[in-house]
Amino acid sequence: MPNTLNYDPTIPEGKAIADLFDDVKAIEDADGSWDGADVVDLLTGWFTRLGINVKGPSHQAGPIKPTAISPDATAGEITQLLLATPGFTASGYPTGNPGFFYAQDDSDNYTDFTLLTFPTATPALKRAAIAELRRHGYAAKEQEPTAGGGTVRVQGYVLLPLPESAGPVDRAVRVLYEAGFTHAASRPQAVVPGYTTPSPVSWRSGWLQIDVISKRGLGRESREEATRAAAETFTHRGLEVEMRGTESFHVLDPSHAPT
């Protein structure tokens, strides 16, 4: 019974698939099995001939090109990047400069990363640092505050653009991400001020509700400040925002932002 192919073998891409299968069948054992090491060698050569770096990231084979690819997330790389950003310095502590930071190489069971410490930085400065790092493709996220000040974990990452089909929720999340805010699914996860996933307002077509959540024990003034900062992220883009309480606001669909 003939197979129904899910590709076109007459085009270059289809021919490449057919050639790979032919090569594998050529080294097939007498019992029909395939030697794993031989197949790996074949795949490596096949990908290489197609222009794919087998040691590179997976996105290179896809249709969407990254917005940014981070360099190595070493303390030296991160330090140089932030030193080129206005408002930050790696010297002068303990003079009280709020832009002072220091970076340390670290790792866990999964990956290497850099841990940034900001002994006296304001929340706005820490968010500015996170936003700058994310703009360069890094995954940067504020950690639970410690006695030594606020810390930010930074590791290598690839930032992909939103597809044109992205909906208002995804667009709102991207706006907050680019501004340095931290996402938390629920209040227990909010070790630092962050936000929950935006949700459509049922009685206001084209509007989203965003809840800003904070770790337990944070005062009302600090919670209001975090909410205002998140709301201003959208007003700076020309979007209409309406405050709805200490930790909540409505924002017009981000796809309506002026171009």
Image (cartoon, rainbow, N blue to C red):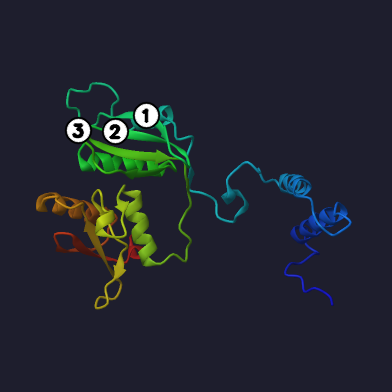
Above/below status of 71 relative to 27: above
Number of marks in the image? 3
User: In the image, what residue type sits under mark 3?
Assistant: Thr
What residue sits 36% from the left and 66% below the top?
A: 168
Q: Earlier in the sequence, mark 1 or mark 2?
A: 1
Per the rendering, the mark at residue 231 is: none
**In this figure, which residue is indicated by the disc labeled 1?**
104
Q: Earlier in the sequence, mark 1 or mark 3?
A: 1
How much space separates mark 2 and mark 3, taking CA atoms? 9 Å
Give the x, y percent position of residue 180: 31, 47
User: In the image, what residue type sits under mark 1?
Assistant: Gln
Q: Is the C terminus in the top left, top right, bottom left or bottom right quadrant?
A: bottom left
Pointer 1 with pointer 3, Cβ within 8 A: no
Give the x, y percent position of residue 150: 25, 38
At label 2, counting other C-alpha atoms closer than 10 Å, the crowd grade (few under 14, some 14-19, many 20 or more) is many
What residue sits 23% from the left and 61% below the top?
A: 211
Above/below status of 251 relative to 125: below
What residue sits 79% from the left and 46% below the top?
A: 38
User: In the image, what residue type sits under mark 2?
Assistant: Thr
What residue sits 39% from the left and 28% below the top?
A: 80
Give the x, y percent position of residue 85: 33, 33
Q: Is residue 209 visible?
A: yes
**In this figure, which residue is indicated by the disc labeled 3?**
120
**In this figure, which residue is indicated by the disc labeled 2?**
117
Image-quadrant location for residue 228: bottom left
Q: Which structural element holds mark 2?
A: strand
| Front label number (1 vs 3) | 1
Give the x, y percent position of residue 109: 46, 40
Pointer 1 with pointer 2, Cβ within 8 A: yes
